[in-house]
Image (tube, rainbow, N blue to C red):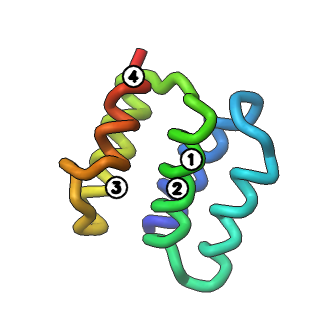
Amino acid sequence: MYEYRILAIADKLLGWMDLVLIDGALDFLEHNEARRGFEMLCDNICEVDVALTEAEYMEMVSLGYDFGLDLHGARFKCIDGLRT
């Protein structure tokens, strides 16, 4: 279930991020490490300052909530700052 949501976000990032950064995060999905893959994807998004739509941001927050991540931590503060 999470894997499909992460893949949908990654698909939207094609063209905005280097494929190597996306694939690195998605490699975790093949090993049933969806949470770690999502965390890495978030970190990579922040690293390259990808502009996120409100819908993309909300999906990322929703996934973070579902994974039980700290939505007030640095990772999500960075992502919040990338909303357009």
Q: Name the residue type under label 3.
A: Leu
Residue corresponding to mark 3: 63
x and y, in percent, of residue 74 in the image = 31, 48
Numbered tag placed on residue 8 in the rendering: 1
Comes first in the chain, label 3 or label 2: 2
Q: Check the image and report above or below for 30 versus 16.
A: below
Density class for disc 4 (Cα within 10 Å; few <14, some 14-19, many ≥20) is: some
Query: Looking at this rendering, what residue extends furthest in the bottom direction?
Result: 31
Pointers 4 and 3 in contact (CB under 8 A)? no
Q: Quadrant of residue 64?
A: bottom left
How many angstroms separate mark 2 from mark 4 (CA)?
Answer: 18 Å
Q: Quadrant of the C terminus?
A: top left
- Label 4 element class: loop
Q: Name the residue type under label 4.
A: Arg
Q: Name the residue type under label 2.
A: Ile
Q: Residue at x 55, y 83 (%)?
A: 32
Pointers 2 and 1 in contact (CB under 8 A)? yes
Q: Quadrant of residue 68?
A: bottom left
Q: Residue at x 78, y 41 (%)?
A: 18
Residue corresponding to mark 4: 83
Residue corresponding to mark 2: 6
How many angstroms separate mark 1 from mark 4 (CA)?
Answer: 18 Å
- Label 1 element class: helix
